[in-house]
């Protein structure tokens, strides 16, 4: 196949498939921390909600 057929990348000779660039993604450690923080904040908010609900009732 030739690059003119549009199936191969003219620079590398590999299939012209869009690959995800490493710079497009956040580091895995940061992603895990964000998920943990989100879960912890929701548990804390639920605890405060329960506290005020029980205290006011």
Image (cartoon, helix red, strand yellow):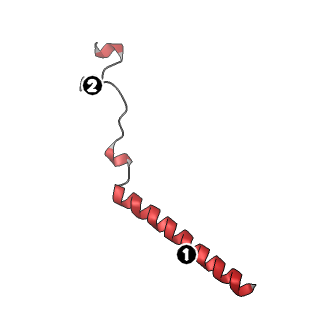
Can you tell which quarter of the image residue 49 is in?
bottom right
Q: Quadrant of the N terminus?
A: top left
Residue under numbered circle 2:
14
Q: Secondary structure at mark 1?
A: helix
Q: Position of residue 52 (x, y in %)?
A: 67, 82
Depth order, front residue of 48/15: 48
Where residue 2 sits in the image (x, y, percent)?
28, 13
From this view, report whether residue 22 is shown above or below residue 1. below
Q: Looking at this view, name the residue that lies furthest to the left.
A: 12
| Neighbours of disc 2 within 10 Å: few (<14), some (14-19), many (20+) | few
Where disc 2 sits, the SS reads loop
Going from N to C along the chain, the mark reached first, 2 or 1, is 2
Q: Identify whether 42 is placed above or below 50.
A: above
Find disc 1 in the rendering and name its residue: 44
Residue at x-position 25% and y-position 25%: 11
Please give left or right for residue 3 compared with residue 39 in the image: left
Percent position of residue 4, x then y = 32, 14
Q: Is residue 10 above or below residue 31?
A: above
């Amino acid at each position: 196949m030739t690059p003119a057929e549009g199936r191969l990348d003219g620079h590398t000779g590999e299939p012209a498939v869009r690959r995800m660039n490493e710079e497009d993604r956040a580091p895995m450690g940061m992603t895990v921390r964000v998920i943990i923080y989100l879960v912890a904040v929701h548990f804390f908010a639920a605890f405060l909600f329960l506290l005020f609900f029980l205290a006011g009732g």
